[in-house]
């Protein structure tokens, strides 16, 4: 038994060292491998996420309302489909109208930007506040704006034109949803299977602890995801109501960006706010005041009222590690990594705490024996 444990630890450490060495020697190669694996494993990744998010509703209907599991899954699935379909029916036409309006008004946006920029530089020249060549600075700002506005326009156009990609992605999500239903219906079987795998390499006690650890990881992920989704929905709704009352242009589009951006701690809200500010500035500058008011109200509700009550200390990591998780996982996995970075780092911290606790307990036992 001792040699078996030693072999498993050596195998794990060796694998980690090989991955780290590969990471430093050929970053692009490793990322391409991970990207290829994620492509083929995408249905299973979707299945795991969907099953984790859908399982609480199934358990509630099954245990509280006393329905059989198959019926509980059917009710949960119908409820989810109805909610998503109703939301999309309301959202999509309004978003398409906003996209078309932005694309059509793109030349006017460029003219407005050039006009505002010229007024700013005229004011700076009159006050002798330009320390460098004003024309070079103005040209650089114009080039930067045109480049990024072209990127935004291209993204909006591609969202509407890449119908085949969207259909294929929806098919993958539906396949993941089918697998998720199978996971939920046979969850005891899969949990026992995982327990047996751990038991083969370690033992009965370790298998129990390993299963408890996986359940705890699932709870961390679930609490964070559901909490973040709910908070972001409230933030987007508050921002939409304030902007709609004030007549801010593209209220729904801006609210969606603010809500989705809120899913990514710190950085997401800043990026979404900047894009929304630019769109409103070029359309109706005076309405920027109401946009900022909507963002301030929504973020304060998140930071001081809803966020602490819903998320609380469920994640259990400091602000520094939240920022680090977004940066590191964003570089590795892109936007999805920025979104999942916090729960991933929370699970890494859980592993660290457990290993440290076990190490201290072993040292205490050795001291007592000696």
Image: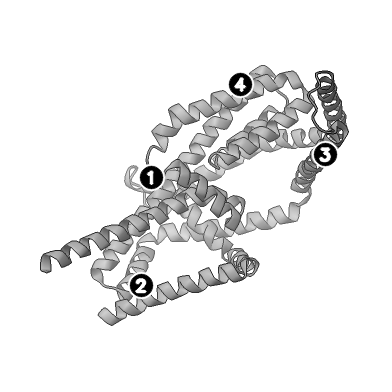
Marks 2 and 1: in contact by CB < 8 Å? no
From this view, report whether residue 143 is shown above or below residue 349: above
Residue 278: tell me if it is visible.
yes
Q: Nearer the viewer, residue 55 or 271?
A: 271
Give the color scheme: rainbow, by chain, secondary structure or one colour: one colour
Q: Dot 4 lies on which element?
A: helix
SS state under label 1: loop
Q: Marks 4 and 2: which is nearer the front?
A: 4
| Quadrant of the drawing holding the C terminus | bottom left
Instruction: Please tell me which of labels 4 and 3 falls first in the chain.
Output: 3
Residue 316 circle label: 1
Q: Residue furthest bottom?
A: 3
Residue 140: image tag: 3
Quadrant of the image for the N terminus?
Answer: bottom left
Q: Position of residue 131 (x, y in %)?
A: 79, 30
> Can you identify the residue that label 4 sits on?
293
Q: Which residue is mark 2?
A: 197
Residue 83 is left or right of residue 198, and the answer is right
User: Residue 3 in the image: x percent, y percent?
Assistant: 29, 82
Q: Nearer the viewer, mark 4 or mark 3?
A: 3
**Mark 4 and mark 3: Cα distance apart in space:** 30 Å
Who is closer to the viewer here, 254 or 335?
Answer: 335
202 or 113: nearer the viewer:
113
Mark 3 Cα shell of 10 Å, populated few (<14), some (14-19), many (≥20): few
Which residue is the extreme one toward the left?
369
The x, y position of residue 73, in whole percent, is: 44, 51
Figure quadrant of residue 255: top right
- Answer with left or right where residue 165 lies relative to residue 62: right
Mark in front: 1 vs 2: 1
CA–CA distance in space, label 2 to label 3:
60 Å
Inter-mark Cα distance, 4 to 2? 54 Å
Which of the two labelled residues, at mark 1 and mark 3, occupies the earlier sequence position? 3
């Amino acid at each position: 038994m001792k040699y078996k444990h030693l072999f498993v630890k050596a195998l794990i450490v060796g694998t980690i060292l090989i991955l780290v060495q590969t990471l430093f020697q050929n970053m692009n190669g490793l990322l391409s491998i991970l990207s290829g694996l994620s492509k083929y494993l995408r249905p299973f990744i979707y299945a795991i996420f969907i099953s984790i998010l859908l399982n609480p509703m199934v358990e509630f209907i099954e245990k509280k309302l006393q329905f059989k599991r198959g019926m509980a899954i059917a009710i949960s699935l119908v409820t989810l489909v109805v909610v998503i379909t109703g939301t999309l029916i309301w959202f999509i036409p309004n978003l398409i109208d906003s996209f078309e309006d932005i694309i059509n008004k793109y030349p006017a946006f460029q003219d407005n930007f050039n006009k505002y920029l010229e007024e700013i530089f005229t004011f700076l020249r009159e006050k002798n506040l330009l320390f460098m060549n004003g024309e070079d600075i103005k040209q650089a700002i114009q080039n930067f704006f045109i480049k990024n506005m072209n990127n935004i326009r291209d993204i909006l156009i591609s969202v509407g034109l890449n119908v085949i990609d969207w259909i294929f992605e929806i098919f993958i999500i539906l396949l993941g949803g089918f697998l998720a239903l199978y996971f939920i219906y046979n969850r005891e079987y899969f949990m026992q299977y995982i327990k047996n795998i751990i038991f083969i390499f370690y033992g009965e006690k370790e298998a129990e602890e390993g299963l408890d650890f996986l359940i705890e990881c699932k709870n961390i992920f679930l609490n964070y995801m559901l909490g973040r989704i709910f908070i972001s929905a409230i933030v987007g709704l508050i921002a939409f109501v304030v902007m709609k009352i004030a007549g801010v242009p593209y209220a729904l589009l801006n609210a969606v960006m603010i809500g989705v951006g809120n899913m990514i701690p710190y950085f997401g809200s800043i990026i979404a706010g900047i894009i929304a500010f630019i769109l409103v500035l070029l359309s109706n500058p005076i309405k920027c005041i109401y946009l900022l008011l909507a963002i301030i109200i929504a973020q304060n509700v998140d930071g001081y009222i809803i966020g602490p009550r819903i998320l609380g200390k469920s994640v259990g990591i400091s602000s520094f590690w939240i920022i680090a998780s977004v940066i590191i996982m964003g570089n590795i996995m892109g936007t999805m990594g920025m979104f999942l970075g916090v729960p991933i780092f929370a699970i890494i911290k859980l592993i660290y705490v457990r290993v440290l606790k076990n190490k201290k307990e072993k040292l205490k036992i050795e001291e007592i024996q000696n």
